Image (cartoon, rainbow, N blue to C red):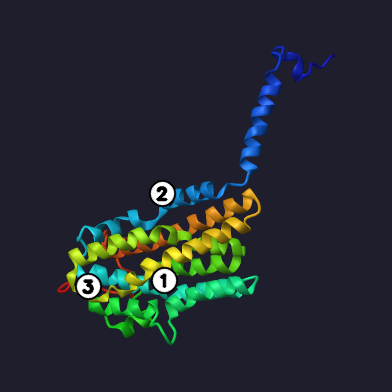
Amino acid sequence: MAVRTVEADRPPKKPGLASNKNTNVNDNVNDEARLLSLDELLARLRAVGEERYHHKHPFHLMMHEGRLSRGQLQAWVLNRYYYQSIIPIKDSIILSRGPDSAFRRAWRKRVIDHDGDAHSEGGIKRWLKLAEATGLDPEDVRAGKGILPATRFAVNEYLNIVRSRALLEAVASSLTELFSRDLITLRMEKLRQHYPWLSGGLDYFEARLTQAPEDAQFAVTYVFENAKTRAQQELAILALRDKCDILWAQLDALYFAYVEPGWPPPGAFSINEEEG
């Protein structure tokens, strides 16, 4: 019995159809493999921020609308401290992986910005001043008393990213600084407006208005110059997306524990109802 091939049952091809189809496929493949220009890369990074950065989280929206109680603000400051405290550790890991002295000198600034030195008190100490302004005991905050388990898991994942992924991706994960200046500016305005009793504890944010843009510029340049393939550029974009998810997850934990449904886990910070 003769076996007919699949081709034999197909209608005749129109002249030029196959070549046009192949041309379109090749164009798509070439476009996916093409390196993004600096402007295109920045546009992709900013698109991640617009979609995933935590400026749109309901907890932050409540803060900016003046709808958080003192106790809820205390919970935010306490849990955010854990994130702040690991930033110089994160940066020290990246620093230790730096391939040359120029990179290490530039990145060392980030460690000093948070840990301080003989000339500056550093971001961690400034954050503790904010904690004190909310009515928290700075030593309890430093000790991490009452921090949500979910906060620890999310923040520790950030350390895992910079330890385990390529240096390019570790650097790219810091690029939330591309968006932070606008959020910090808004936050300072709204904190002063709605929570004037915090006005003496906002030095941390003042410093970040200049530090963050400088850091972002260096990181963007590094990523652009060192991502040699489109695949590496896509991994850098993914690292930024993952960092945004980590920031969002921290606020998810706060919202669940202290807003709705309001179920803090055992051992977590408890809001004083008389103050909150």
Please state the horizontal and vertical placement of residue 155, each as a whole percent of the image: 45, 68
How many other residues sit within 10 Å of disc 3, few (<14), some (14-19) or many (≥20)?
some
Q: Nearer the viewer, mark 1 or mark 3?
A: 3
Residue at the spot x=44%, y=58% of the render? 178
Residue corresponding to mark 3: 199
- Whole-angstrom CA distance, mark 1 to mark 2, is 22 Å
As helix, strand or loop, the secondary structure at mark 3 comes to: helix
Residue corresponding to mark 1: 83
| Quadrant that contains the N terminus | top right
How many other residues sit within 10 Å of disc 2, few (<14), some (14-19) or many (≥20)?
few
Near-viewer residue (84 or 101): 101
- Whole-angstrom CA distance, mark 2 to mark 3, is 30 Å
Left or right? Give the position of 30 relative to 84. right
- Whole-angstrom CA distance, mark 1 to mark 3, is 22 Å
Question: Residue 201 is drawn in which quadrant?
Answer: bottom left
Left or right? Give the position of 107 relative to 255. right
Residue at the spot x=62%, y=53% of the render? 232
Please state the horizontal and vertical placement of residue 81, each as a whole percent of the image: 37, 74
As helix, strand or loop, the secondary structure at mark 1 comes to: helix
Residue corresponding to mark 2: 51
Residue at the spot x=26%, y=59% of the render? 260
Residue ranking furthest to the right: 1
Please state the horizontal and vertical placement of residue 111, each as a whole percent of the image: 48, 76
Q: Where 72 falls versus 23 (above or below)?
A: below
Near-viewer residue (212 or 271): 212
Q: Nearer the viewer, mark 2 or mark 3?
A: 3
Lower position in the chain sequence, tag 2 or tag 3: 2
Amino acid at the residue labelled 3: Ser
Amino acid at the residue labelled 1: Tyr
Please state the horizontal and vertical placement of residue 70, each as a whole percent of the image: 20, 70
Residue ranking furthest to the left: 274
Q: Where 62 falls versus 127 (above or below)?
A: above
